Amino acid sequence: MPLLQVTNLRIRLQTHRGAADAVRGIDFTLQRGETLGLVGESGCGKSLTALALMGLLPDAAQASGSILLDGQELLGLDDSALCRLRGNRIGMVFQEPMTALNPVHTIGDQVAEPLRLHRGMGRAAARREALALLERVGIADAARRLDAYPHQFSGGQRQRITIAMALACGPDLLIADEPTTALDVTVQQQILDLISDLVAERAMALILISHDLGVIAQNADRMLVMYGGSVVESGPTEAVFSTMAHPYTRGLFAARPQLVPRRNGERTRLSTIPGTVPELADLPVGCPFAGRCGFTVAACHTTAPLPVPLGPVDAGHMARCIRLDAMPAATQASA
């Protein structure tokens, strides 16, 4: 049995134009020790999916389908049951550490809090464990800085602190939502290496959410490409990058900035995906990418595409597109 099994997850939000589906029936599984990458433009449903797993959706949101953690259904659990899971069996590293940390509490107290709440540790024991966690995530002179406040740390250090908090109780599942946003390239790699080492060390499952294809290529075993609340392509990371079967996957890859020499002194233009991301209420009933895709035909607007296996069925590489046969073969992608 997989550690996590998500089936037909749908999330409906209330917008200024009425109810709209922000996540439209996604399915995936995750085994212990495995890393799953979620990639796509802002607003595609990545973070909402993570919040649904944590039971942190907005009050007006309606979620349906199934989320099984070790066979336990999470959708529909009451607040007290969800509180026993959050920070205990499921940990999360949020995008912006400055908003995830409480500015009026010391970092020592904040890292120790889940240990006291879920493990029943006394103040002294929790403080010792918090110190060990901060040292493990690379906070220099951690013993002296236990009583410091979040504003006294750099962005990279604050992200390390949030990682220590998320890992305090040794969760089965760690969700990292854009964990390197606003960090410089060197610190980004340090944070990603740290998360990877800790996941391997503790045999956790990891969901890594990012808009950066390079981050996903280097760190995820399998990946989901999301657009308009739907998974348009999924499978082993290497297979997705080598094939790029869906037009949206190809568009994302082509739009990546690349450092390449100028030709004859001229600048090369950055590729873009035509059009703009539609509002949730305007998504077509068929393929969510219809209209922005160069292969769009009338049926794309009205026919919800079924997942099409690519390669051996047991490989698990799928794409949702009714026009796969119209696209030329992709060249090998290097992220």
Image: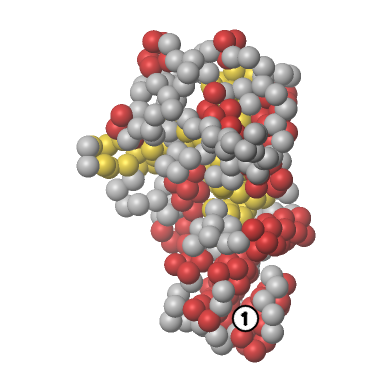
Quarter of the rendering occupied by the C terminus: top right
Residue at the far right in the pictured view: 201
Which secondary structure lies at badge 1? Answer: helix
Residue 89, x across and y down, in percent: 60, 58
Density class for disc 1 (Cα within 10 Å; few <14, some 14-19, many ≥20) is many
From this viewpoint, is residue 265 visible?
A: yes
Quarter of the rendering occupied by the N terminus: top right
Q: Residue at x 61, y 49 (%)?
A: 208
Q: Amino acid at mark 1?
A: Ala
Q: Residue at x 56, y 87 (%)?
A: 147
Q: Nearer the viewer, residue 223 or 151?
A: 151
Relative to 156, residue 311 above or below? above
Residue 230, x across and y down, in percent: 47, 31
From this viewpoint, is residue 30 visible?
A: no
Relative to 306, residue 142 above or below? below
Residue at the far left in the pictured view: 17
Horizontal relation, residue 72 to residue 195: left or right: left
Q: Which residue is mark 1?
A: 126
Residue 323, x across and y down, in percent: 53, 13
Residue 280, x across and y down, in percent: 33, 35
